[in-house]
Image (cartoon, rainbow, N blue to C red):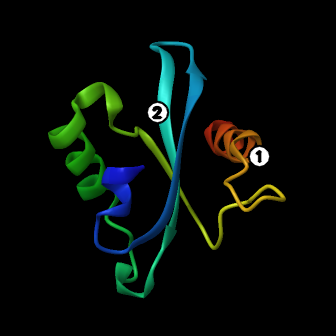
Amino acid sequence: ERVLLAQPGVRAACVVRLPDPEWGQLVAAAVVCGPDAGPEPDTASWAAAVRTELGAPSAPRLFRVLHELPVRGIGKPDRVEITRMLAETRQPG
């Protein structure tokens, strides 16, 4: 999350792991873009930055851009809800 938050166009980020039938687990990220993100978020560049700083296994393979991150009552990201949303993104159809 620290690396993603340092990228141009990223205002907020939450990284979770999802089950993956091929690899066991998959790194996924929910991202809120800032005004400098442009019309198409550069998720490839964000993943490359994570790969460079933390290594390939840490780079998200799935991104979902949200208007806001769901939060819990104390203002922290709701990782359970974010995981559910990202898992839905992976569903076919």
Answer few, some or many: residues within 10 Å of disc 2's Cα (few below 14, many 20 plus, some between 14 and 19).
some
Q: Secondary structure at mark 2?
A: strand
**33 shown above or below 4:** below
Image quadrant where residue 56 sits = top left
Residue wearing tag 2? 27
Residue at screen point 29% across, 47% down: 47
Residue at screen point 31% across, 52% down: 3
Residue wearing tag 1? 81
The reply, left or right, for residue 75 in relation to residue 56 is: right
The residues bearing labels 2 and 1 have C-alpha atoms spaced at a distance of: 16 Å
Image quadrant where residue 16 sits = top right
The C terminus - image quarter: top right
Q: Does label 2 or label 1 sit earlier along the sequence?
A: 2
Q: Secondary structure at mark 1?
A: helix
Q: Residue furthest bottom?
A: 35
Residue at screen point 36% across, 56% down: 4
**64 shown above or below 18:** below
Residue at screen point 74% across, 59% down: 71
